[in-house]
Image (cartoon, rainbow, N blue to C red):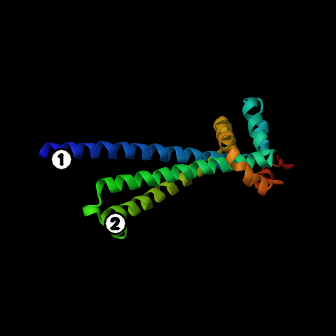
């Protein structure tokens, strides 16, 4: 009996460890996606033109997104959708960890489970996760804002791939809400000073 309990404890520890590692990887991926959205929304046309000689293909890909309102909306929406999916997976992982560590005693009815330790631990985990994600987003935004063009050029192939993947799902929304000119395009206009 003692060996069985020991094996079960090791299994719980192993699974919990794997879930925590998966959670950390998802946090890093979410930060990456947030940085891509921030970079794509902050690029300046004049700075991109200055980088044209160094990375002509990447600059052309960025221009193809910011010059076409539907493509820009599709790319930013794809990045946001990917972030939402990651957040949903993180919530499920935290749920799994907490309910694995605090199992439902005596198969309590669902309403009593809501007041159980597992549910309270899940809420605490979600609160901690939201605080961590907010801090990471602030740090990533500050880092990207220093030089959004180089970040956008670095990530443009990934952004294009993600846009192609989510594009079929976004087409109905883009047809219902056609984009004439995006906020980003106003930011990308070259001024006389530049």
Q: Position of residue 156 (x, y in %)?
A: 67, 37
- Pick the residue in front: 178 or 58: 178
Q: Position of residue 102 (x, y in %)?
A: 29, 58
Residue designated by label 1:
5
Specify few, some or many for label 2: CA neighbours under 10 Å numbering under 14, 14-19, or 20 or more.
some
Distance of mark 2 from mark 1, alpha carbons? 24 Å
Q: Answer with left or right where residue 77 lies relative to residue 120.
A: right
Q: Residue at x 52, y 49 (%)?
A: 86
As drawn, 86 above or below 115: above
Q: Answer with left or right where residue 79 lies relative to residue 51.
A: left
Specify few, some or many for label 1: CA neighbours under 10 Å numbering under 14, 14-19, or 20 or more.
few
For label 2, the SS is: helix
- Label drawn at residue 54: none
Q: Residue at x 79, y 50 (%)?
A: 185
For label 1, the SS is: helix
As drawn, 115 above or below 156: below
Labels in figure, total: 2
2 or 1: tag closer to the N-terminus: 1
Residue 156, visible in the rendered structure: yes
Residue designated by label 2:
113
- Pick the residue in front: 68 or 81: 81
Residue 34, visible in the rendered structure: no
Q: Position of residue 73 (x, y in %)?
A: 73, 50
Q: Residue at x 32, y 53 (%)?
A: 100
Q: Position of residue 81 (x, y in %)?
A: 61, 50
Q: Residue at x 76, y 52 (%)?
A: 174
């Amino acid at each position: 009996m003692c060996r069985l309990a020991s094996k079960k404890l090791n299994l719980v520890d192993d699974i919990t460890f794997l879930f925590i590692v998966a959670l950390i990887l998802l946090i890093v991926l979410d930060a990456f996606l947030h940085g891509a959205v921030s970079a794509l929304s902050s690029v300046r046309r004049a700075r991109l033109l200055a980088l044209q000689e160094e990375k002509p293909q990447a600059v052309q890909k960025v221009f193809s997104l910011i010059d076409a309102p539907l493509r820009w909306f599709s790319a930013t929406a794809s990045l946001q959708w990917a972030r939402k999916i990651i957040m949903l997976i993180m919530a499920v992982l935290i749920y799994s960890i907490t309910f694995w560590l605090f199992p439902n005693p005596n198969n309590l009815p669902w309403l009593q489970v809501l007041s159980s330790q597992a549910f309270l631990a899940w809420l605490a985990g979600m609160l901690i996760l939201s605080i961590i994600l907010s801090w990471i987003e602030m740090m990533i935004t500050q880092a990207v804002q220093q030089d959004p063009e180089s970040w956008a050029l670095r990530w443009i192939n990934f952004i294009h791939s993600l846009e192609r993947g989510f594009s079929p799902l976004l087409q109905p929304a883009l047809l219902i809400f056609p984009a004439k000119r995006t906020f980003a395009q106003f930011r990308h206009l070259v001024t006389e000073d530049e």
